[in-house]
Amino acid sequence: MDSAIKNDSPAVLARGLCKSFQHPTLGTTLAVDHIDLCVPRGICFGLLGSNGAGKTTTLRMLLGLMPPTSGTLELLGLPMPAAECQVRAKLGIVPQADNLDPDLSVEQNLRVYASFFGVARHGLDTRIDQLLRFAHLTDRRAHRVESLSGGMKRRLTLARALINAPELLVLDEPTTGLDPQARHILWSRLEELKAQGTTLLLTTHYMDEAERLCDELVVMDHGRVLDQGSPQALIARHVEPWVIEIRFAAHLETHFAPLSALGKLERHGSSLFLYTHERKLALPQIERLAAVQPTPPVLLQRPAGLEDVFLRLTGRDLREDA
Ligand SMILES: Nc1ncnc2c1ncn2[C@@H]1O[C@H](COP(=O)(O)OP(=O)(O)OP(=O)(O)O)[C@@H](O)[C@H]1O
Ligand SMILES: [Mg+2]
């Protein structure tokens, strides 16, 4: 059957994917609402969205962990759920919540998982040594999982997901709760995997992470895809290239109102933000307006990024359904 699989087929192809949940008091929730996804092989593809946007539900359907309410799905050129067993052998999963066995050692966790996948015993010791080195956990191999830090557990979950050398690695918030060093280690591991040809599909709430790792991404909200593109394309499409923050100046909105001629002036929290193409014209004007204030506000300028796109597309209000 493998010979029938087209290697140029996308890693993920979803059409009209939907998932609704029945809730005893809230009624029906349409968690995923007619999503189309096409993830080419060998890239890192990101799903971004606020809490409750439908990211985990989408991944769970892709992974065959939850049946779609409607829609069609192909993974690695094979129809799901019909070819689930065949596909599962080629998948690696890093779930949102760690599900390691806390009573087993680091090495035992890898061995048990290998046996679930039917990984051949021949070469398994070498594979485990490699994965422990890859995850910087060699000196912890005999330690019980419950004694590991959060970052070590995350790295072990990644190592475990790689036991079957997957073609497609799916990671649900792989770096949430990690310190900057641990995030950087994980990023470099993911970059190595991509360089080796593994397709990565991940969700994250960290826009710097998405900007750094993802070749292509979708922004989701309320179960729908709002837009798709590379980080650079989305930034160019949705926001002006420069952001100037006039910090602690929200109460001076009318004073700074003339800046609206140079871009989009928005008030968020205690600051005003000018999104503009005209940074060189705007800065002296802002400085003149600021100088006449008894306490001139602090000015910060930076290139626009994915976070600005995300907030522009999904709004700044906290999600009630989160
Ligand atoms: N098993 C379930 N039963 C009922 N409702 C569910 C279930 N799983 C998810 N939902 C609902 O589906 C919606 C999407 O949830 P989901 O976990 O996919 O969001 P998410 O984008 O992963 O959010 P987060 O960023 O917080 O992880 C939410 O409204 C959630 O309450
Ligand atoms: Mg989630």
Image (cartoon, helix red, strand yellow):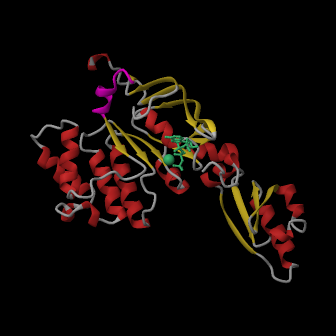
Q: In this view, does 210 lie to the left or right of 308?
A: left
Q: Residue 255, position in %: x, y?
A: 90, 69
Pick the front one: 159 or 118: 118
* Image: magenta residue range: 81-90
Q: Which residue lies furthest to the front in this view?
A: 24
Q: Residue 287, position in %: x, y?
A: 81, 73
Question: Which residue occupies 44% across, 37% down?
Answer: 60
Q: Residue 289, position in %: x, y?
A: 86, 72
Q: In this view, does 317 lie to the left or right of 258?
A: left
Question: Which residue occupies 37% across, 50% down?
Answer: 190
Pick the front one: 189 or 150: 150
The question of residue 239 being in magenta is answered with no
Give above or below for 79 relative to 25: above
Quarter of the picture containing the N terminus is top left
Q: Is residue 137 left or right of residue 310?
A: left
Q: Residue 141, position in %: x, y?
A: 18, 60
Question: Which residue occupies 50% across, 36% down?
Answer: 58
